Image: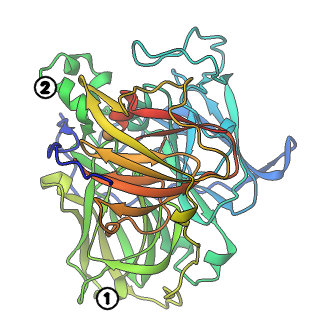
Amino acid sequence: GFAVPTLGSTREPGSLLPSLLPLPTPFRVPLPIPPVPAPARHPDYPDADFHDLTDRVAHPEIVPGTRTEIWGAEGLFPGPTLVSRRGRRTVVRRRNELPVPTVNHLHGGHVPAASDGFPTDLVYPAGTGAMAGIPGMPGMPHDPLAATSVGYRDYDYPMDQRAATLWYHDHRMGFTAPDVWRGLAGFHLVHDDEEDALGLPRGDRDIPLMICDRSFGEDGSFRYPALDPTLLATPGVQSSFMDGVLGDVVLVNGAPWPVLEVSACRYRFRLLNASNARRYRLVLDPPPPGGGGLVQIGSDGGLLPRPVAHDALEIAPAERFDVVVDFSRYRAGDEITVRNAFGSGGTGAVLRFRVTGPVHDDSRIPDRLSESPGLDPALAEVTRDFRFQSRGGEWRINGELFDPARPLVTPRLGATEIWRFVTDFHHPVHLHLAQFQVLSRNGAAPGPYDAGWKDTLDLQPAEAAEVIVRFTGYRGRFVLHCHNLEHEDMAMMATVTVV
Ligand code: C2O
Ligand code: CU
């Protein structure tokens, strides 16, 4: 039997860290679209699309009238949007000009272990030479298997995977949360012929939306507990750090509550929740006549078999929902606000669309999107249980803290396995290397947001879910972890070594 737990907490997934400057006026700043760099050629990789990105400090104007220090690929937050074709190798050279080591992970990527961004495979800043030891949480074990580099690292992606919305972000052991909070995240899209043939909205009507929350200090800097010694000394802040950090300003593509002018036609939006800990319930206000305004066409792992119309979308950290919104269901001049029904005040708003006028639109949403045969539970050779639970004030998986050098599980390459997750708190559970399919939630059918191939599963307090996964392609070290980034940094992570 697969018991559904009854104990658990109904607390929010984190605690709010208030901004110390006057909050910007919503729906004034135009929605930024991250640049899409053209791939280059590199003699070392003659068959690959090559990108050369430098991680550096920059000071953009996020809140109008003030400057914020960010850390970003090419000094941008979000970083540039990389675009790959299925089956075409892509090599990303990431140079580190930041004051700390980095690790770059391609979230959702089906990539070799050496390019996955294992949390101890640090890239030290150029010129630092040998830095002693691996910074991590106190008492965390040293990792003798770490493959470190100095100055830059080439991440080599075969892109042997379906069209999907992937994203990249920092994954440094013990410091992912502050590094991502500072801006080390961006999109990496994969296209393929099957998707191209569908006639979905494309070009400037295919827009990635990175949603995340932040708080600002008086001087415009990002406010974060561990970056601010006065905060850590404040009673209550330690526990907010424990549960996950929530900001009071919602950024979309790095802009506070932006506005986008849209024509009265179909748009594809690739929604990504890049927040450290915040979950959102996104709704269109007003909804279009007849409802169902958010037509989901894809999940973390690519296109769904068929579109699914939603009135609301619940999105946990690291999840992606690919949706089409048809603004021809509104009238010219209408203003439609994307609200977060889980929030209130500022955190209850996300962005606004302003409908200009009708245009020619030959895009469509076919009834059949992509056939991707499911995995057969009868072929599963192992069933494994993972308890995401706190013990003694620490976030653990099966009672263990992250040990990079010692795998918690060692699936066989090619194996199909059933994994069961049980939680005591909000934990967005994320697996590297492989996409999975949800078989059940709390002993019943999968939930409304569990469709398709997933790499991140939104689990609420005292939930249990069963997924099926197949490990293909690559042996070596990967991880399973909570994508509440504060939980992750507090070692709610397990080494998964494919053998
Ligand atoms: Cu989005 Cu292991 O990470
Ligand atoms: Cu968690």
- Where is residue 445? Give x, y as percent: 33, 69
Q: Give the labeled residue for mark 2.
A: 236
Residue 329 circle label:
1
Is residue 189 visible in the rendered image? The answer is yes
How did the renderer colour the structure?
rainbow
Check the image and report above or below for 143 versus 132.
below
Tell me if label 1 and label 2 are in contact, CB under 8 Å.
no
Q: Residues within 10 Å of mark 1 (few under 14, many from 20)?
A: some
Q: Nearer the viewer, mark 1 or mark 2?
A: 2
Classify residue 71 as left or right of residue 104.
left
Q: Residue furthest top?
A: 132
Q: Residues within 10 Å of mark 2 (few under 14, many from 20)?
A: few
Q: Amino acid at mark 2?
A: Gly
Image quarter where the C terminus lies is: top right
- Where is residue 258? Give x, y as percent: 32, 59
Classify residue 450 as left or right of residue 80.
left
Alpha carbon of mark 1 to alpha carbon of mark 2: how far? 47 Å
Residues 180 and 458: in front is: 458
Q: Which residue appears at 26% of the width and 57% of the height?
A: 280
Would the CB of label 1 be found within 8 Å of ligand 1? no
Q: Amino acid at mark 1?
A: Arg
